[in-house]
Amino acid sequence: MSDRRQVIIKVFRKYGHSLGPESLEFLEDLLDRHDIADEDVEFSMEWIAKEYNKQDDAQMKVSLEVLHRVYEAFQNGEGEGAQEQALLDPDHHLFVIDAFEMPLWNWSTERSTFERAPGPLTSSGSADSRVTAMRNRLNVIKQCVLRNDHFSPSTLPSKDRENLLTLRSTKQLLGRAGERFLLFGMLTHSKEGKLCLEDQDGLVELDFSQLDVPSEGLFTEGCLALVEGDYTEDATLLVIAIGHPPCESREAARSIFGHIDFLGKGATTLLEDKQFSARVQVELADLRFFILSDVWLDRPETLHGLRKLFDNCMENSFIPKLIVLCGNFTSIGIPQGNGREVRRYQEHFEALADLISSYPLITRTTHFVFVPGPLDVTLNTVLPRRPLLSSFVGRLKSRIPNVHFASNPCRIKFFEQEIVIFREDLMSRMLRNLVGVKPDVKNDDLKRYLVQTILDQSHLMPLTTSIQPTLAEYDHALRLYPLPTAVVLADTYDRYQMTYEGCHVFNPGRFVGNSFTFSAYAPARRESEECVLDVDLDDGWS
């Protein structure tokens, strides 16, 4: 009984509530009355705690009266819940989330949790917001590191406590030459051009002369790294090991911060996530999302490829619920002030609108999402990028009812899943700014290293703002915490797909040439599959 009581207290404490003796007794009685198994106690309490939070008169100290009201509402709604089980409408649970719509949650070191930023966000930002953005990057990962088993001591005495790693700060190095330290900070260059590790207290120059090879991953300026080494008389750190911070699974993060609405579309409990996941696997097993990248509308063969794609969908009675079209939508950039090229750019979108609208069933039932690429015309060129300009896509808006012009990056929320779409030549950008990588790396290793680096860094662009400027107050839109369900890294690099720490990451390839490549994502399986469309053949894609 005491174990169940501890679970109840833990769940309500996670939501910022404390329980009095009467409230605790009432909740324990509910569990006994409904014969809730021990393994289901946490899920049940998650639902009650969330419903309690929705009440207007909810207080930090849980009110027994409000708890009674929540329970009565649950009993009265059991019939409605059973009725909803028969209806699973994917359109009602599909949201395309613009980077500029996501709420900003800053990490509070005082409260050890996220706090929502007050007031509206601006694109201009300020000196304070730029500092806050960088501190958020560091603190979000640091709290994961400190919670990792290698850094977090058990409450029970054991031999493992002797092997625990202790993080130190750069300010603790002073006067301690000859000692070994483990530091966590950002790789950056000093004014003299020396590679350093910088944290919130200062920086220290790194000496890699004794390092054989770094751990797996790509190390660039701007990456956050764990560095172990000996502090020398020359005020440098003689590095003996360097690695990326450990990645925290989506389930682990959601179990702690599940009550925080990071996307701005309403938070769900772990119980709801589990129920949605089970139902999607059964009821929407055949549902697919198509993701295409480098859809060059200025090339006539691209429209032929799209027509072939739509024809195959109709012939096979397989209509995708979502089609994501990533830029670049032109094979060449548009010179500034070239009115003729701008007009052609608009005409290409108009031709696409005519093509899509010639398939009434696809037009009515499929959601189309347009994500701009580096060469496309938007209001800004820094990340996150604004959507395509409205003046170019007027016909698409008027003819396609379910069309979404999203930012880059953007997110798709589908039931309990979160899918990040990012169009950037990320591999070449990372390789150009390397400061360290294992030698003799093969092509497949590079793909794996890129995925590992991006997810370990919990950020889509782990570079300094001097290399890749970002809008400071929207830097959180590039954050990958909690870990998404899937990440689309649309790139000009070779196509790949892999799953790392439960997150499925894939590059859909390029929809160019005579053999058009794209990816089909299956939400029921949380996996993607390669699709190749040959416009010279009549047997569809393989």
Image (cartoon, rainbow, N blue to C red):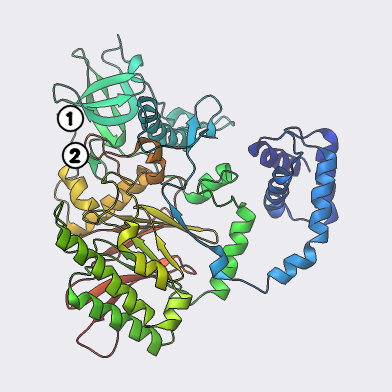
Amino acid found under the numbered disc labelled 2: Gly
In the displayed structure, 347 sits above or below 54; it is below
Q: Nearer the viewer, residue 187 or 216?
A: 187
The secondary structure type at the circle numbered 2 is strand
Residue 419 located left or right of residue 422: right
Image position of 411 (left or right of 87): left
Label 2 crowd bin: few (<14), some (14–19), many (20+), radius 10 Å: some
Report the front residue among 332 and 148. Answer: 332
In the shown orientation, is residue 1 left or right of residue 147?
A: right
Q: Residue at x 33, y 73 (%)?
A: 353
CA gap, disc 2 and disc 1: 10 Å
Name the residue tied to disc 1: 208
Residue 339 picture location, percent across and down:
17, 58
In this view of the protein, can residue 319 be seen by the observer?
no
Residue at screen point 44% across, 36% down: 140
Name the outermost residue toward the top.
Answer: 175
In the rendered structure, which disc, 2 or 1, sits on the residue that comes first in sequence?
1
Query: In the rendered image, which residue does mark 2 sit on?
Result: 436
Q: Amino acid at mark 1?
A: Phe
Looking at the rendered image, the quarter that the N terminus falls into is top right
The image quadrant of residue 340 is bottom left
Q: Image height check: is 532 above or below 539?
A: above
Q: Are marks 2 and 1 in contact (CB under 8 Å)?
A: yes
